[in-house]
Amino acid sequence: MKTGIFAVIALTLAAMMAQADEGKLSIELNKFETGEAGGCRAFFLFRNQTGNSFEEFEMSLAILDGDGVIDRLLSIDAAPLPVQRTVLKLFEIPDIDCSDISEVLLHDLPACKPQNENPVDCFPLLALDSKTTANLAQ
């Protein structure tokens, strides 16, 4: 009897976790590596569970150094982002060692436009995560 109750609870929790990711555009700062010309190469994974493909998706990022001070602003274009797909995008962050980056702040989305629709405010759709030593925040 107890085993059955625990199984039902586990299945319910798993279903709730899956629903929490539905409708989200997950952005994961997956890894850093030293770039060919110095600087830092950032690997981002975009998981689009929103139900819409995005033909425009531009992020404005603030790169914070080891002391938490803004080192630079960086604008990156991550489009296109197809629906129900995971997309890998690489971006170069020049003139800074990866170990000197403490945080990447997503402070603006200058362009966010679903395929064949008007631009939208994508901030409510976002779920951010980082597997690097640097935090990815908004």
Image (cartoon, rainbow, N blue to C red):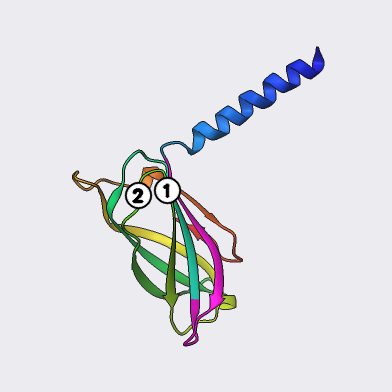
Alpha carbon of mark 1 to alpha carbon of mark 2: how far? Answer: 6 Å
Nearer to us in this view, 117 or 125: 117
Q: Quadrant of the C terminus?
A: bottom left
Nearer to us in this view, 134 or 117: 117
| Left or right placement of residue 135 versus residue 107 in this view | right
Q: SS at mark 2? A: loop
Relative height, residue 119 to residue 42 (above, below): above
Q: Residue at x 24, y 47 (%)?
A: 115
Per the rendered image, the range of residues in magenta is 24-40
Q: SS at mark 1? A: loop
Q: Position of residue 18 (x, y in %)?
A: 54, 34
Q: Given contact means CB atoms under 8 Å apart, are the residues at marks 1 and 2 in contact?
A: yes
Question: What residue did someone put label 2 on?
Answer: 82
Q: Position of residue 10 (x, y in %)?
A: 68, 26
Label 1 amino acid?
Answer: Arg
* The residue positioned farthest toward the top in the image shown: 1
Relative height, residue 52 to residue 46 (above, below): above
Relative height, residue 24 to residue 137 (above, below): above
Q: Residue at x 36, y 44 (%)?
A: 83
Q: Residue at x 34, y 67 (%)?
A: 76
Asked if residue 25 lies in the magenta stretch, the reply is: yes
Q: Position of residue 117 (x, y in %)?
A: 19, 43
Question: What residue did someone put label 1 on?
Answer: 85
Relative height, residue 8 to residue 46 (above, below): above
Q: Quadrant of the N terminus?
A: top right
Q: Residue at x 62, y 23 (%)?
A: 12
Res 106 → quadrant: bottom left
Label 2 amino acid?
Answer: Pro
